[in-house]
Image (cartoon, helix red, strand yellow):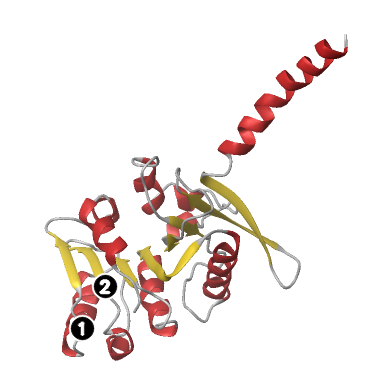
Amino acid sequence: MLCRYLSMLVVLASPLISFGAEAQTGFLPKEFKNADDTVSKYVVFVPADYDGKTDYPVILFLHGSGETKGDKSGKMPVEVGLGAAIKKQEKTFPFIVVIPQSEKRTWKADSDDGKRAMKMLDVTMKEYKVDAKRQYLSGLSMGGFGTWSMAFTHADRWAAIVPVCGGGDPKGAEKIKDIPCWCFHGDKDTAVKVDLSRSMIEALKKAGGKPKYTEYEGVGHNSWDAAYGTKELWTWLAEQKQK
């Protein structure tokens, strides 16, 4: 009777054990407690082969303005841009990715959203085995602007940046000239003019930097699907490491 009872417990417990193991990788929902005791939700992607022993590179991804409308679940930013690209290669994508959600539709480095995103990155680096010399920053549209802004403000932090269809202040180029950069934009973008990326790339070159720039001919605002679908981007990014 006792053996039969123990067997039933094992059967009942097995699904729970399996679920717990599976929940350690993939897109994991997280909660960040703010100073005023409110909670901000975000998502962390953990590679399928994460074992807690090897240091992994980490990407902070900043979404566009469309992923803030009427939603505070923290899930919408996963559906557009980098998250969508990861889903196509979820079993092999080798980066930990921190995906915060803007609450005030801005990713400026000095904004509440910008500061919170950096704190979420810090929390993730404590929670997981992360290579501190391989921290990367990327974002699209509003997040592209945020990428440039956070690059200027935290220039000593990033091993590389990947701004997509955004823009920044060319006067800040001197601060980030030594950060490896691969920028993407569509030449028919009517939401964020391509000249904004062109100006940043030109300013970086004048400052002595060697940025990579991909401009898609005939492409409008959505240049992120092509950008994050570029296999060479991930090979290049993984090679970038702070000295």
In this rendered view, identify the residue nearer to me: 54 or 138.
54
Q: Where on the picture, by quarter, is residue 218?
A: bottom left
Residue at 69% in and 69% down? 34
In this rendering, the answer to whether 132 lies above or below 76 is below
Residue at 25% in and 57% down? 235
Q: Quadrant of the C terminus?
A: bottom left
Q: Secondary structure at mark 1?
A: loop
Marks 2 and 1, how far apart in space? 9 Å
Q: Earlier in the sequence, mark 2 or mark 1?
A: 2
Q: In the displayed structure, does residue 212 sit left or right of residue 180?
A: left
Q: Quadrant of the N terminus?
A: top right
Amino acid marked by disc 2: Cys
Q: Where on the picture, by quarter, is residue 48?
A: top left
Disc 2 and disc 1 in contact, CB within 8 angstroms: yes
The x, y position of residue 139, in whole percent, is 38, 64
Amino acid marked by disc 1: Gly
The x, y position of residue 7, in whole percent, is 76, 15
Residue at 46% in and 49% down? 78
In this rendering, the answer to whether 42 lies above or below 84 is below
The x, y position of residue 200, in whole percent, is 24, 80
Identity of the residue furthest to the left in this view: 217
Q: In the displayed structure, does residue 79 sit left or right of residue 169?
A: right
Q: Which residue is mark 2?
A: 181
Near mark 2 (Cα within 10 A), the count class, few <14, some 14-19 or many ≥20, is many
In this rendering, the answer to whether 92 lies above or below 56 is above
As drawn, the label of residue 209 is 1
